[in-house]
Image (spheres, rainbow, N blue to C red):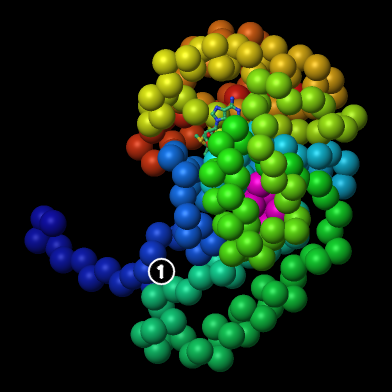
Amino acid sequence: MNDTAYVLFDTTGESLHKRGYRKLKTVAPLKENIAASMVILSRWIPQQEVLWDPFCGSGTIPIEAAMVAKNVAPGLNRTFLAEQNGFVSQDLWNKARLEAIERIDYRARFEILASDIDQNAIQIAKENAKNAGLKADIKFFKADARKIKRPAEKGIIITNPPYGERIGNKDIFNLYRDFGECLKDFKNWRFFILSGYEKFEKAFGRKANKNRKLYNGKIKTYLYFYF
Ligand SMILES: C[S@@+](CC[C@H](N)C(=O)[O-])C[C@H]1O[C@@H](n2cnc3c(N)ncnc32)[C@H](O)[C@@H]1O
């Protein structure tokens, strides 16, 4: 470009957001790094708050949450292209992997719930959690998010409901309205909801305390914070 040539060197291979555990996908999966960002932005306190994703799809948010709680390095389950080019010895790669394994907190105490209305999504999410070595850390079950009941005094909902862009759902307004109604019973809980639906707050029935723009691939979405 403009008489300048660039020599680019790919050290990664498959995109960095791909952690390697998601062999199976549901209709509109979230990128792993977006799911991890949602968990980190929520400032979840694993020892004190139950974390629930009631629209879990392929399980990305609960799996990333368990990785955050146990301090599992995001690249631990995958390989990198730079491992094949010889610039960094395999010994160093092995050492880095061992270090990451030593840092995993196997004694971390936390509770993560993951539900979806679609039994097939639950099966896929379970399989993905198994690939990540985290199946025993997450409780998966089938449930309609419009009818869930508060399972504990304190908790946090981090979720990514359908928003019509990729899942053709004409009833999206009603779904958000009913979900908002249902969450009125979740006293002392905090909510973090990612949606690209422009009437989200109106339908949900409450203005968010804060929001933050996040791109899920090319789709502009907002993460709505309810404290
Ligand atoms: C945008 S996807 C979630 C994607 C997920 N974050 C992932 O990474 O795979 C929305 C999910 O909501 C589920 N869903 C739709 N209506 C629902 C309802 N009433 N209750 C629970 N889940 C519902 C769909 O089955 C779908 O899996």
Height in image: 170 above or below 212?
A: above
Q: Residue furthest front?
A: 119
Q: In the picture, residue 8 is in which quadrant?
A: bottom left
Task: Please state, as top left, top right, bottom left or bottom right, where the N terminus lies in the image.
Answer: bottom left
Height in image: 222 above or below 180?
A: below
Quickly name the residue at label 1.
12
Q: Is residue 60 magenta?
A: no
Height in image: 82 above or below 70?
A: below
Magenta stretch, main secondary structure class: helix
Residue at image point 81% right, 66% down: 106
Give, as a single range, the part of the protein colored magenta.
62-68
Residue at image point 35% right, 37% down: 218
Which SS class for mark 1?
Answer: loop
Q: In the picture, residue 15 is in which quadrant?
A: bottom left
Q: Amino acid at mark 1?
A: Thr
Nearest the eye: 177 or 207:
177
Quick check: is the Cβ at mark 1 less than 8 Å away from ligand 1? Answer: no
Picture coordinates of residue 115, whole percent (x, y): 66, 38
Task: Please state, as top left, top right, bottom left or bottom right, where the C terminus lies in the image.
Answer: top right
Picture coordinates of residue 76, whole percent (x, y): 59, 70
Asked whether the viewer can see residue 42, the reply is no
Q: In the picture, residue 154 is in which quadrant?
A: top right
Ligand 1 falls in quadrant: top right
Picture coordinates of residue 103, whole percent (x, y): 74, 70
* Disc 1 packing (10 Å; few <14; some 14–19; many ≥20): few
Picture coordinates of residue 177, whole percent (x, y): 60, 11
Question: How many dots with numbers?
Answer: 1
Residue at image point 51% right, 57% down: 22
Asked whether the viewer can see residue 218, the reply is yes
